Every structure is written in structure tokens, then in C-alpha cells.
Image (tube, grey):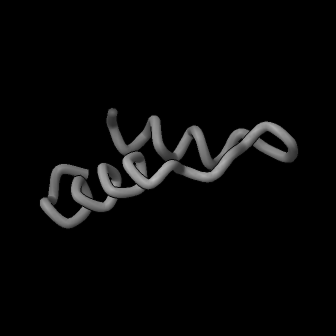
């Protein structure tokens, strides 16, 4: 999953957003640290 998809999950607005799962957060952080994001 791309970083933009993770951000979209977090930023849907009041009542529609949700926290990332552990695996989603791990994937997002790995992308940022590797320079892929």
C-alpha cells in the first residue's frame, strides 16, 4: 500500500477516519525510512 493510501485512511474527516493498524503503520514508517515515500 502506498503512503498516500495510509494518509487517506487517517485524514477522511470527523467520524470517518480510523487509526492505522500495526501492519499499516509499520509499512508506512518503512517507506519513509527507506526513502520510498
The N terminus - image quarter:
top left
Q: At 86% from the left edge and 42% from the top edge, which residue is drawn?
A: 15
Single out the residue that lies furthest toward the front: 22
Q: How many marks?
A: 0
User: Vertically, is 1 above or below 14?
Assistant: above
Q: Is residue 20 left or right of residue 17?
A: left
Q: Could you tell me residue 37's position as x and y percent?
A: 26, 51
Q: At 43% from the left edge and 40% from the top edge, which residue is drawn?
A: 4
Q: Could you tell me residue 26's position as x and y percent?
A: 33, 56
Q: Nearer the viewer, residue 26 or 3?
A: 26
Q: Is residue 14 left or right of residue 34?
A: right
Q: At 15% from the left edge and 59% from the top edge, which residue is drawn?
A: 35
Q: Could you tell me residue 3's position as x and y percent?
A: 37, 44
User: Vertically, is 31 above or below 1?
Assistant: below
Single out the residue that lies furthest toward the right: 15
Q: At 20% from the left edge and 66% from the top edge, which residue is drawn?
A: 33
Q: Could you tell me residue 18's position as x and y percent?
A: 68, 46
Single out the residue that lies furthest toward the bottom: 33
Q: Is residue 11 left or right of residue 25?
A: right
Q: Nearer the viewer, residue 23 or 15?
A: 23
Amino acid at each position: 500500500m502506498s503512503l498516500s493510501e495510509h494518509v487517506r485512511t487517517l485524514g477522511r474527516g470527523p467520524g470517518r477516519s480510523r487509526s492505522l493498524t500495526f501492519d499499516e503503520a509499520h509499512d508506512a514508517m518503512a517507506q519513509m525510512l527507506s526513502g520510498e515515500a
